[in-house]
């Protein structure tokens, strides 16, 4: 892993693997950013690429500025790294405290196919693809989603994508959680969308009849057939894993399962689908033929996840570790050493 300090503005760029064809990752903003805190964010992307057998790598840009100085910091970044951005060597997108409007001077140089930015009923197509991938992973572990009860931790755009795909497959959504709380009941995807688009993370209060939502951690119960998690790195902690019982867990964002949680779940024989498998959809679109349609990429996402899960789901060490072994086997074909640490919170 290489960290390069920016010269034109306080900040840094982290490149995970040497010699990659392209580097991809978020740009984050904050005066107290620490390079080490981004490690699992970029490692997640590296393992996504390895899952797809692409010689590409995760990266992360950190702008160590206050939000009031965001515009000038982004302008400096766009100028200093213009060659990397225009050549396609480095591609980035909005992360912590940045949106597409603020990051526009950098995004103007993005060489990727941006079909993933298309709007799909209030969420991006990328979020829809994560929904396709996550539900495909879940279906492979529980024999299809028809009639299955599910819970979604980290409900947001990607969570809404999961809810829509799961409901279309016949699943019953009984619980969703954000940082503001947890809503329970048989939840309709249309009502979920309306609440999220209107109230963001406070949607759990709306979905609870404008009453007091349950505490966020109550999402971790073993009374469902599938648990999806993806609010942040280490969203599922060891404590959360201990209450999940034997319920299959599907991670859908970077390092959403902590190393302690994975150990607890493995000891219980609970299958865990890796975040870098469930979330391959957006990466499939980044260098896709412009002629490919939304339906083409949806199908490619489902086919890719199903193929990986078919190969890894019954491994003695569980699907998460099997997916790591699979990704690492590809990495050894073009890297002298494996990166230190797997995508775990």
Image (tube, rainbow, N blue to C red):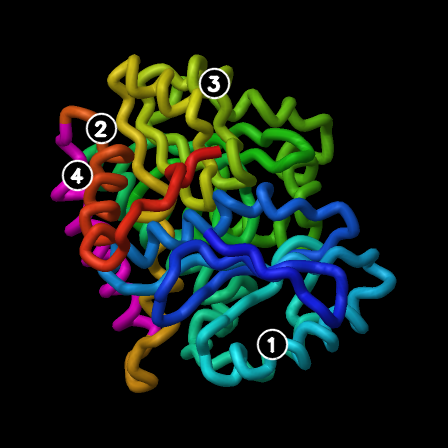
Residue 121, compared with residue 209, is above or below; it is below
Q: Is residue 339 left or right of residue 179?
A: left
Q: Closest to the observer: 334 or 186?
A: 334
Q: Gap in Å between the C-alphas at discs 1 and 3?
A: 40 Å
Find numbered disc 2 in the image and state the secondary structure of the residue it sits on.
helix
Q: Closest to the observer: 51 or 310?
A: 51
Q: Gap in Å between the C-alphas at discs 3 and 2?
A: 17 Å
Residue corresponding to mark 1: 81
Q: Gap in Å between the C-alphas at discs 4 and 2?
A: 7 Å
- Place of residue 119 in the rendered image (x, y in percent of width and height, measured from the top left): 51, 71
Q: Earlier in the sequence, mark 4 or mark 1?
A: 1
Residue 235 inside the magenta-drawn segment: no
Q: Which mark is residue 238?
A: 3
Q: Indicate which label's residue lies in the foreground, 2 or 1.
A: 1
- The residue at 31%/45% (across/down) is 338
- Based on the displayed image, in which of its 4 quarters is residue 173 positioned? top left
- Place of residue 271 in the rendered image (x, y in percent of width and height, measured from the top left): 27, 27
- Viewer can see residue 327: yes
Q: Which mark is residue 312?
A: 4
Find numbered disc 3 in the image and state the secondary structure of the residue it sits on.
helix
Q: Which mark is residue 318?
A: 2
Q: Indicate which label's residue lies in the foreground, 1 or 3.
A: 1
In magenta, the rendered stretch is 294-315
Q: Earlier in the sequence, mark 4 or mark 2?
A: 4
């Amino acid at each position: 892993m290489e960290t390069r300090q920016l010269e034109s503005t306080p900040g840094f760029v982290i490149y995970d693997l040497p010699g990659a064809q392209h580097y991809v990752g978020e740009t984050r903003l904050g005066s107290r950013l620490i390079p080490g805190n981004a490690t699992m964010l970029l490692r997640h992307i590296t393992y996504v690429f390895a899952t797809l057998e692409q010689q590409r790598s995760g990266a992360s840009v950190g702008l160590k500025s206050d939000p009031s100085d965001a515009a000038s910091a982004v302008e400096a970044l766009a100028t200093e790294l213009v060659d990397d951005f225009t050549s396609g060597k480095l591609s980035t997108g909005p992360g912590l405290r940045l949106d597409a409007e603020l990051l526009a001077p950098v995004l103007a140089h993005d060489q990727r196919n941006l079909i993933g930015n298309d709007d799909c009923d209030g969420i991006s197509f990328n979020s829809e693809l994560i929904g396709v991938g996550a539900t495909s992973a879940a279906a492979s572990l529980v024999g299809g989603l028809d009639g299955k009860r599910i819970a979604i931790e980290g409900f947001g755009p990607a969570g809404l994508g999961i809810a829509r795909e799961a409901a279309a497959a016949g699943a019953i959504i009984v619980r969703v959680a954000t940082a503001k709380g947890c809503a329970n009941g048989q939840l309709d995807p249309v009502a979920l969308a309306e609440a999220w688009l209107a109230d963001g993370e406070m949607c759990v209060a709306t979905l609870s009849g404008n009453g007091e939502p349950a505490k966020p951690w109550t999402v971790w119960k073993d009374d469902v057939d599938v648990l999806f998690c993806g609010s942040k790195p280490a969203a599922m902690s060891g404590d959360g894993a201990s209450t999940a019982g034997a319920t299959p867990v599907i991670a859908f964002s970077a390092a959403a399962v902590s190393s302690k949680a994975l150990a607890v779940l493995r000891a219980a024989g609970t299958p865990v689908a890796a975040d870098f498998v469930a979330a391959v959809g957006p990466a499939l679109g980044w260098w896709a033929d412009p002629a490919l349609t939304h339906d083409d990429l949806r199908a490619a996402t489902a086919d890719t996840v199903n193929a990986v899960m078919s190969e890894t789901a019954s491994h003695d060490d569980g699907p998460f570790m099997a997916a790591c072994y699979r990704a690492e086997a590809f990495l050894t074909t073009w890297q002298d050493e494996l990166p230190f640490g797997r995508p775990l919170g």
